[in-house]
Image: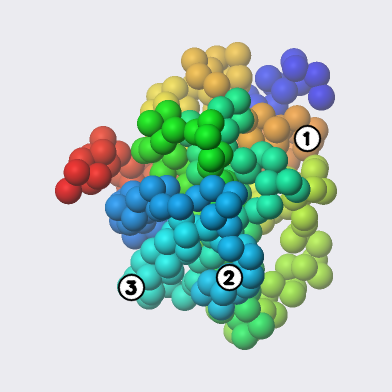
Amino acid sequence: MENNDLRFLVGTYNSNSGLGVTLVRKSSELQSFFYQPLDECVLKSRFWEYANTPDDVVDGTKSEGAIVDQTFSAQVLSETLTMFFQKTGFPIRVVSRSPDIDDNPDYHLIRGNEFYGHRFILGGEMGLFARGQMLMYLNQAVFDDNDFDLADFDVFKAVKDTTAIIRHEIVHAMQFFNRAKQQKISRVEAKRKYWNEGVIVPQNEGALYYSSPLEIDAYAHEFAERMLREHGLEKTLTLLRFGLPSATFAPPRLLVDFVETVNCKNTVSRLMGKIYTNVVTMTSRGLFENDDKLPSLLNS
């Protein structure tokens, strides 16, 4: 897709176009404990301060019922999140896994890596146990033994990035949960139905993956919160209304990748409409009003 087409598509959504602002799809309406309380929980865990180099990865670790390769840092994050959700009554287990950096070099955080300084978690995946209990995988990067310094990191930005990924996966969890409840079927059967309908698509499928209605909902939530928290309401609305040329900040890279990969005006327009609705809903709920208080939690 040429750049002029990209600029046009990102600006196609008009808040008066009739797509509506009143409600996002039910699966994207997350309860309040998924926001500030979750952010605080992850921040207080200080999981990034525990052993997390390639030499610290233990193969075949049993974590929350799954067998994965894990550092101690990943284990701390897994246990912290699973306990958090148990206390809230949300039926999910979380497993942070440590990929082999020989096969996944992007997961080796070393100076020069594009994620160095601002990210600890580089992705996630939503799954189910055989009996239907929800299982979230997080893909955690490892730190270089020598060319690495935590002082180079914006910890608060990295934590907000981590919880944005978690909430993306929670939207997927709610898609299974809500369909099961509405159709009076198991969560396993709900996932099977989505699979049979062709809307559960591997990420390496490019345009087909991004065009899935399940991913449009999850990415719309993620992009909305990333732009709101990083750049504020007015700058975010300007980009949504007038497109990339109007932006006074760099849009999330994944948003640009989405638009360039999909190459479909209608799909991108649906995404932008959902982002807009999420922005309005998140703002009206005041979900990120206390972001400036996060740093104080590390000293409490």
Give yes or no for contact between labels 3 and 1 (Cβ–Cβ under 8 Å).
no
Residue 61 marker = 2
Amino acid at pointer 1: Thr
Residue 264 in percent (x, y) is at 79, 35
In the rendered view, tell whether residue 196 sits above or below residue 189: above
Marks 3 and 2, the one that precedes in the sequence: 2
Amino acid at pointer 2: Thr
1 or 2: mark nearer the eye: 2
**Cα distance between the residues tagged 1 and 2:** 36 Å
Can see residue 252? no
Q: Secondary structure at mark 1?
A: helix
Residue 261 marker = 1
State the image quarter where residue 267 is shown: top right
In the rendered view, tell whether residue 97 sits above or below residue 290: below
> What residue do we see at 54% from left, 48% from top?
53
Q: Secondary structure at mark 3?
A: helix
> What residue do we see at 54% from left, 55% from top?
56
State the image quarter where residue 62 is shown: bottom right
Residue 128 in percent (x, y) is at 63, 74
> What residue do we see at 53% from left, 31% from top?
147
Q: Quadrant of the N terminus?
A: top right
Residue 33 in percent (x, y) is at 34, 60
Query: Is 293 displayed left or right of 183 in the figure?
Result: left
The residue to which callout 3 is attached is: 87
Amino acid at pointer 3: Lys
3 or 1: mark nearer the eye: 3
Residue found at the far left of this picture: 300
